Image (cartoon, rainbow, N blue to C red):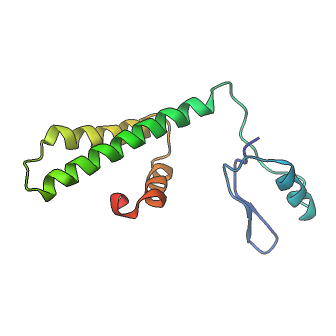
Amino acid sequence: MRIAETVLNDFGSVIIMENTVLDEHLIKKLQNQNISKIKVFEETNKPVTKVKEVFQRNYNQGIYEVKNIISEIIIDKDVKMEKVEKVVDSVIDMSDEKMDLIRCLNQIKSSDEYIYT
C-alpha cells in the first residue's frame, strides 16, 4: 500500500511522507506512535514499474539532448530550435502522462541542480 497523505505526529512532525510504500518497519513505526488509521491510495491494476521505466527512459533521453544543446552553445554552433522544442515537448508530455509536474521537477533538481536551473 502507498500512503495517500503525509502522516504527522501529535507535534506536527512528519512521520511518513505521502507516496511512501508501507512495509513492516513503517507499520511498526505507526503502531509505536499509536496511529491506527491512515489514508492509502486505492490499488490499481496499472503496472507502476512500466510508468517509471518510460519516465526514466524519457528523462535520460531529455538529459542527453539538453547536454548536446549546451555543448553546441559552448562551441558557438547554431542551435536548432527543433531540438529545444523536442526537449520542451518531452517535459510537457511527461506531465500529461498524469505525472505531477512538481514531482518531475524535484526529481530533476535532486539529480542535477544545473539542469534544473
- Examine the rendered structure and indicate whether residue 16 appears above or below residue 59: below
Q: Residue at x 54, y 37 (%)?
A: 52
Q: Residue at x 81, y 51 (%)?
A: 38
Q: Which residue is drawn at 29% across and 38% down?
A: 89
Front in this rendered view, residue 14 or 37: 14
Where residue 43 sits in the image (x, y, percent)?
A: 72, 32
80 sits to left or right of 103 = left
Where residue 57 sits in the image (x, y, percent)?
A: 44, 36
Identify the residue at the far bottom of this view.
Answer: 11
Q: How many labels does the image show?
A: 0
Q: Which quadrant would the C terminus be assigned to in this image? A: bottom left
Q: Residue at x 21, y 54 (%)?
A: 70
Front in this rendered view, residue 15 or 73: 73
Which quarter of the picture shows residue 35? bottom right
- Examine the rendered structure and indicate whether residue 8 appears above or below residue 46: below
Where residue 63 sits in the image (x, y, percent)?
A: 35, 47
Front in this rendered view, residue 71 or 43: 71
Q: Which quadrant would the N terminus be assigned to in this image? A: top right
- Examine the rendered structure and indicate whether residue 47 appears above or below residue 38: above
Front in this rendered view, residue 43 or 71: 71
